Image: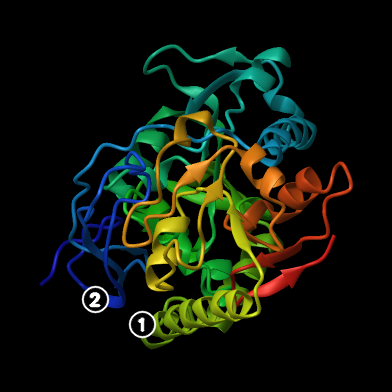
Amino acid sequence: MSFKCRGCSGENVVPVVDLGAQPCADYFPAAETPGPDPRWPLELWLCRDCTLVQLGPVEAQLPEEPLAVESATSIAHAETSVKEILRDYPELAGKVVCEFASHHGGSWLGHLSAAGSQLATEDQQADLVIDVHGIVHEPQYGDMLKLRADRLAPGGLLVMEFHHLLPLFIGNQFDTIRHGHWAYVSLRALRNIAALHGLAVESVKQVEMYGGSLMVMLRHTADAAPDASVEVVLADEDAAGIADEVQLGSLQEAAWHAADALHAELTRHKDAGRTVLAYGAPSKAPVLLDLSKVTTDLLPFTVDIAPGKHGRRIPGGCMVPIRPVADLTAAKPDVVLVLTWDIADEVVAQLEADGGWGATYLVPLPEPHERGF
């Protein structure tokens, strides 16, 4: 089977990773729903031309109800980012801004408005265009990048932040591969596709969001003056081989190895008489628990701060119910599996705020390991 690249529309696209049939990651059915839940292929394909890594020929089948609550880490990141952008680009103060909203939250508009920025009207070109973890939710990456380029005024700045393919690969973050996230972006792929739409990368900054992200500044090609940060990241990507189909294919074996290791670790704790419960019901959890063959026998329930998820369960084969955080602190398990591993520091600090109860915190990736505090 073949299809056209979601970035450049080329046909030189090949499969590199197959995680099997998986449920939609943000489909949280009611806890009493018996299942089985619907599943679709979850595969990564590589475009040999533009190097974009992307979901294969699959279409989203279920609507994703917005249930998550934005983390304190994300909220703080938005405020800090706006301050830094206006500090580094003082010419943007008071100018017109446009934001392409993300399913993850983290909007910059409130902070920009408070700093005196003017919000763009519909279809108005903007001096500052922002996309923070938004574009990957669009099936046609290239078309959506063109839309952002069209909204950018001459001399303006396009800021794009996205989960970086490099830490996904080297950190074995296979659970971030999910239906609804259509593209897994490297700087090289973004640069290649941006060039098709008259954009050039000017600078890049590595940020810690979602396990490792890039904040990339782009301009219309005639306005761009790339700095040294661009070549540094490109060199790191090349060294890791994330545009090489054989190298990328090794992620599949690494994923299964880590999944088996998680199952073995939870089994070890159970056999030793320790209780294990989890924190978080992120969109990362379904594929992690499904590949790890973790069910309620090993993980009786997880908790989440989002009230909309309470009374529901993780989709797929695990059937793990989702409860309020108070249920975790009341149960005082011996081991807490941190499913929201990208904000593990925030989770541990929250649970240890009143002294905790001596729990061991277990982070599942790149392989299961204990997290100190």
Give the residue pinned by disc 1.
245
Mark 2: which secondary structure? Answer: strand
Coordinates of residue 324 in the picture (x, y in percent)? 58, 37
Along the polypeptide, which appears first: circle 2 or circle 1?
Answer: 2
Disc 2 crowd rating (10 Å Cα; few below 14, some 14-19, many 20+) is some
As helix, strand or loop, the secondary structure at mark 1 comes to helix
Residue located farthest toward the left when viewing the structure as drawn? 1
| Distance between the alpha carbons at the discs numbered 2 and 1 | 8 Å
Foreground residue among 119 and 283: 283
Say which residue appears at 57% left-offset and 41% top-offset. 304
Q: Is residue 201 above or below residue 354?
A: below
Residue 112 placement: quadrant? top right
Q: Quadrant of the C terminus?
A: bottom right
What's the image's color scheme? Answer: rainbow
What residue do we see at 58% from left, 83% from top? 239
Check disc 1: other Cα within 10 Å, few if <14, some if 14-19, many if 20+.
Answer: some
Q: Point out residue 78 in the picture as x, y percentages from the top left corner.
A: 67, 34
Given contact means CB atoms under 8 Å apart, are the residues at marks 2 and 1 in contact? yes
Q: Nearer the viewer, residue 311 or 180?
A: 311
Q: Is residue 10 above or below residue 27?
A: below
Tell me the residue at 77%/43% (across/down). Answer: 350
Residue 4 marker: none
Taking 86 as reference, is 226 left or right?
left
Query: What's under tag 1, amino acid-wise?
Result: Glu
Per the image, the residue denoted by label 2 is 14
